[in-house]
Each structure stands twice: as structure tokens, then as C-alpha cells.
Image: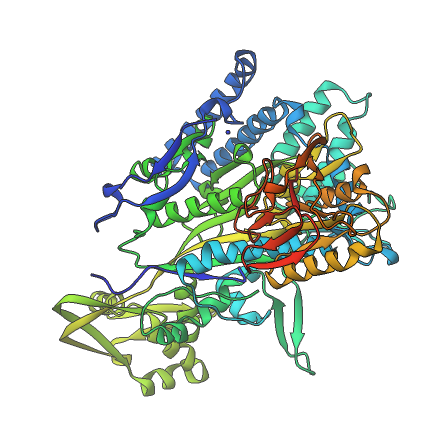
Amino acid sequence: MLSLRSATSALLRRTGTQISTVRAVSKVRSSPIRLCASPPIRVLSLSACLWQNMDGSIEEVLAPLRLAVKEQGDLVRKLKAENAPDVDVNKAVAELKVRKRILESKELTLQPKDDIVDRTKMEDTLKRHFFYDQAFAIYGGVSGLYDFGPIGCALKNNILQVWRQHFIQEEQILEIDCTMFTPEPVLKTSGHVDKFADYMVKDVKNGECFRADHLLKAHLQKLMSDKKCTAEKKTEMESVINQMDNYTQQELADLFVQYNVKSPITGNDLTPPISFNLMFQTSVGPGGNMQSYLRPETAQGIFLNFKRLLEFNQGKLNEISPRSGLIRVREFTMAEIEHFVDPNEKVHSKFSNVADLEIMLYSSKAQTSGQSAQIMRLGDAVEQGVINNSVLGYFIGRIYLYLVKVGVAKDKLSFRQHMDNKMAHYACDCWDAETKTSYGWIEIVGCADRSCYDLLCHARATKVPLVAEKPLKEPKVVNVVQFEPNKGAIGKAYKKDAKLAMEYLAICDECYITELLNENGDFTIETEGKTFKLTKDMVNVKRFQKTLHVEEVVPNVIEPSFSIGRIMHSIFEHTFRIREGDEQRMYFSFPATVAPYKCSVLPLSQNQEFMPFVQELSEALTRNGVSHKVDDSSGSIVNAPPYSRTSSMRCSRSSYTSHPDEGSETPEPILSKKLFVNPIVWSEETLPESNASTNAPPGCSTSPGHGALPSFTHLTRHWALATQGSMKPSHCLNNASGG
């Protein structure tokens, strides 16, 4: 059995049949699989699929667009198979992307309009209750920067806490806390300095910057909305928009001149597009000599500490983690997992737990064939090779379960595979979790197979081997080819540059170099812009046999990366409700697990004699770790304003207190008003004296659910916290489920 265990590193990173058990999928793993119970899941029916919920007339509109995508996809595959020139392949790929974008845009516009949230009303509710607001608002604000208010902070913290429980505790993860400042050489090695860039234009007078492709798109859309714009011109501009991702710097500059693009704010001229690195550059130290960046991802800190963490975990690859409008922001919270795995055994021992999940998948093959996303069982997707391996499949399943748990709607969640031309420079396969919002489909989680790219890059740059040792079942004898540089000969030939040649030789492929020496008697290397020709007298070759008991492995990395801000925005849209019959009553139906307040305490009247009981209940909730809100503001609960306030902020439960005539020695029946929301309905019932027991009356929940609240009992003259067994006098507790 391989001692190199799969490991996970993490950051403080619609109607169908129920399935009660998970089936074993023996084809995707070599070790035995144990049948185990699984939480009930709901299988999505095909008719529920947003991508396929279309009548025949809509499909008639889409059919020619699908055919156009398929034809172009076939052409791209043919060109690649024939090893056609890159210029022809790139041109065909660009046209394929244009046709795909036209198809997807048409699919989105044909979706039912009532499926999209009223974003204006939602954002008004968010700002009114200070979930979040633009930062530095009293100074005019800064676009892309937001401050979270008390409720927003609570929601965000709960989302992260559920993330920690769902991933970190489940996988028993180790954690590290890495610095936010990253020296330039680190990010130069990882490829971020060269590849993380977009094109930008500036206002020539005030220097205000705009992202070039976004500004050009907005300008063309404005021109297209003009009634004087001809159909021919609209078609031309639509073509430009659809190819926006493919333009070079010079082509963008030509388009800005062609369409006379000006600053949308001042109307001033703009500079030609220039490359702009997306990372924040800074310097470290008083002299400012060490160029650094604010880290663009948390993963690099994990990779650089890989060797120490491997030692800490006794040579086993166990989990490692750093600490770390909401759609496009300048500063954001990421939650990332780095799962290290043997590249020759990409299997996950717990894949059977998620193998029967039915998830909407949009593979790269489907995209290039003009097909829609398909709902597939995860186990089948891995067996058929749609998903590359069970480790990637496991995390896609866990990501799906997490997103549904925190409030993302199942019928608005899909996983899209990256096409080759859209793959990040470090990834060999990648799937994005996307949600349907008022902005369209947006990416909220990425799950990439980074292979061993990062560890190899940093090992080459630092000359420190970042490998794990894998014990062999049987020792094996191998032929070793090793060479030693002749420092004197190299130094004499290349003087001060000899060090560069020596460093390169220390990390190059020895067998390859030896083969070149035997064939040609010399070989040429290039490093850091310099060329070195080395001969046999500069390198001494040794050949010998060696018995190996362990094998060095450079682990591959599976990386799920979560954008917390985008997840929050998706939850806001998917849980936003407008009460039927009263459009002024707007609220969010968050799951109890992430609700900012788990409970609200509402006095039935403003009688000051209630206050001690309210305080006692509040203190008891606090002792039990139940986040809650006491609303003792003016107004009566009978008129519902306190509950409406807390409902719009989304408390998962409301509890209100009353007590009988204090002069009475005999318990009197209490009129209990139970509040149900969406719409509000009041029902009255007289609670008999026999209810003075640990049994709650009909309609009262003794267990708030989701494990978020302690169990409560409903009493005539008493209330009790069942978790403590304590008894407190003279008031009634009632739970009402929020909308």
C-alpha cells in the first residue's frame, strides 16, 4: 500500500427520486470500496435543466447555432490532428469561440425572464440593512472596494465556517499562515508576472484608467442601442464584441480609433492600450529595493513550504493550508485547497461518497460540438473519462454539496470544463462551478489539476528538490548516469558567467546531456539569455548501478479555489424573496447554517417587566453559542414590525415571550400566536395546562434543525433550555419558522 496519502491543504481557504445509499464504483479505484450511508440527495431531472428547459420553437432557433459550433469544432480537431500551422489553428479556435459565445448568449436571452432576480430591489435591501456598501462612501467611494456591515460580516464568517467544517475537518487538514507580500522572483518563477495581465487605456488629461476590452464593449453596445444604427453596423459590432478575447494589443488600438472611443466620464481622448499586470506591486524595506506583490493566490505559500510540511507530517502528504458588487472587486477573499496526490495513482478513497451525485456538467467536448450541458452521475463521468480522475471528481462532488448547503440553488448551478485555449498556464485540466445570476453565468469556484507545474518551477529556481519519497514494495536496481562539471574548465572558458552554466547543469536531465555528448561530443545550453557550448572535457560522466528502496515523486496538485464574494452574491440572488401580495416586503431565505442570526427574541409588549426575561433568554442563547438578535424596539409583535425587520435580515427562527397575570396563583391558559411567513398567517390556539411539560404544542418546533440551535421546550408557566435542563419562571417561548 502506498504510504503517500492523498492530501488536502486548505485556506481559512430541481424534482427527482431520493437515493439513500451510495453505490460502489469499482472501476475507478483499485482498493476495496465500503458501502456507506449518504445524506439523501435529489436527482435533478433533465426537464429541470436550465440549459435544456426549452420548448420546440426555442430549439428551432438554437439548432442552426449549435450546428455552426459543431462544424467549427470539427474543423479545429481536424487541424490539430493534421498538425496544421499554428496560425491556421489559432484562427479556427478564435472563430469557434465566437460561435460558442453567440450560442450561449442566445440561450441566456431565451430563458424565462421571471427566472432572474430583480437586482435593483435586492441591492436596495442589502444596502438598507448594511450587508455591505461601497468603501469610503462619504469621500465619494472607490469602485471595486466594499465594506461589509454587521450582518454581512456574520454571513461571510458563517460561509467560511461551514467551508472549514465541510472541507478542512472532513479531510483533517493541516494549516499554515503565509505572508501576503510575495517577492517578485517567486511570482516570476510561477509565471504570474508574465501571464497575469490585461490591456488598459488611460484618460490623457486626468489619468483615469479603464480596462480596454470592457470599455470597448460598453461603447459598442451604446452605439448599437442608437435607433439610427443600421442593421449592417449592428451585425459588424456584434462580431467585434464576440471576438473581444482574441484581439491583440494593436488590434484593440485600431478598434478604439475606428469607433472613436472616448472616456465615458469626461469625454477626453484615451491613450493606446497598454499591458497592465493584474497584481498589486509594492516594495519591501526602507530602500524599496526588493520588488514585491500582494499575493494573487494563496497557493504559492503552500508550495514554498512543501518541504517543511512534508517533514512535519513524517514524510506523508497530508493536507496543508494557508490562511488567508462582489463579482469584480479589487480586493477579495479566497478559500483554496491544494490536494497533493501521486501522479501515477490519482484515486480518492472517499470518491464512493459522492459517486451517485447527479450534477450538471458542460464538458469541453460538448462545448465544441454545440451540445448543451448534461446532467450526469459523477461515477459515470469519471468512468467515461469526462472527468479525468476520481480525485478531481471527488472535489467536484464536495464543491457541489457545499454550495447547495450554503444556499446556492441546484437548478442554477453547473460545472463547465475549460477548453484548452482557456486553460490557465499552470493547469492541465480545470472545471468551474458556475451559477446563473442577473449577470448571466458567473464562475464562483475553480477546480484545477495543476499537475506538478509549481513544485517543478520552484525546485528549478531554488535548486531545492520538492519531492516526496514513495516506499517501494520490492527494492530495485537501476542504472544511474551521473556527471560532474569540471569547474576549472568551465570557469576558464566563461569567466564570471560560469556560475550560470554550473547552476543549469545542476538541474538538467543528465541522461539527455550524456546522449548529446556521445553523439556530438558537445552540447549547447541557454539560460538567463546567455548561450554556453560545453564539451566533453568540461563534463565528467559516471555510470554505476544503485539499489533503490524508495522512489522520489513530484506530487501533482488538485486545487479547488473558492471566491467567497462571488459565492455570497450568488446566495443573495438565489435566496432573495418578495412576499406575495406585498412587494414592499423583501427578505432573504438563507439556510439556517449560514443565517447571520440563528434566532430573534421579540417581546410581545413593551412592558418593562419583560426585560429581565428577555435578558435571561438572550444570555442563555449566548452561553449556548446561538447568534441571535433582541428586538425590543417600539411597536408590538402583533403588528409584526419587529419580526419583519429580523425576517428581512433573515433570522432562521423567531422566539417571543409573554407571561400571565403575575397576581394569579393558578396557571391560566395562554393565547399563543404562532407566526408563519410567506405570506404571514396568524393562527390562535389556547394552550391547555397539560402542555406544561416537555412536549411542545402542535406547530412549535422543539428542534430548530440544522444543528444550529439547542432544543427548546414550550411550557405554560415555564421555559427551559433542554440542553441545560434549567427551569426559568413565568414566560412562554415559541418558535416560528422564517420564510
Which residue is rendered at x = 37% and y = 82% of the image?
493
In the rendered image of this protein, does residue 518 appear above or below residue 28?
Answer: below
Q: In the figure, is residue 545 to the left or right of 531?
A: left
Task: Give the image quarter of residue 207.
Answer: bottom right
Percent of width and height locating residue 377: 37, 34
Q: Quadrant of the C terminus?
A: top right
Task: Give the image quarter of residue 525.
Answer: bottom left
Percent of width and height locating residue 252: 67, 42
In the rendered image of this protein, does residue 698 appear above or below residue 478?
Answer: above
Task: Give the image quarter of residue 513.
Answer: bottom left
Which residue is rendered at x = 46% and y = 71% of the image?
304
Q: In which quarter of the image is the N terminus?
A: bottom left
The residue lying toward the viewer, choosing from 617 and 336, is 617
Any part of residue 388 in sight: no
Q: In the figure, is residue 490 to the left or right of 520?
A: right
Residue sitting farthest toward the bottom: 488
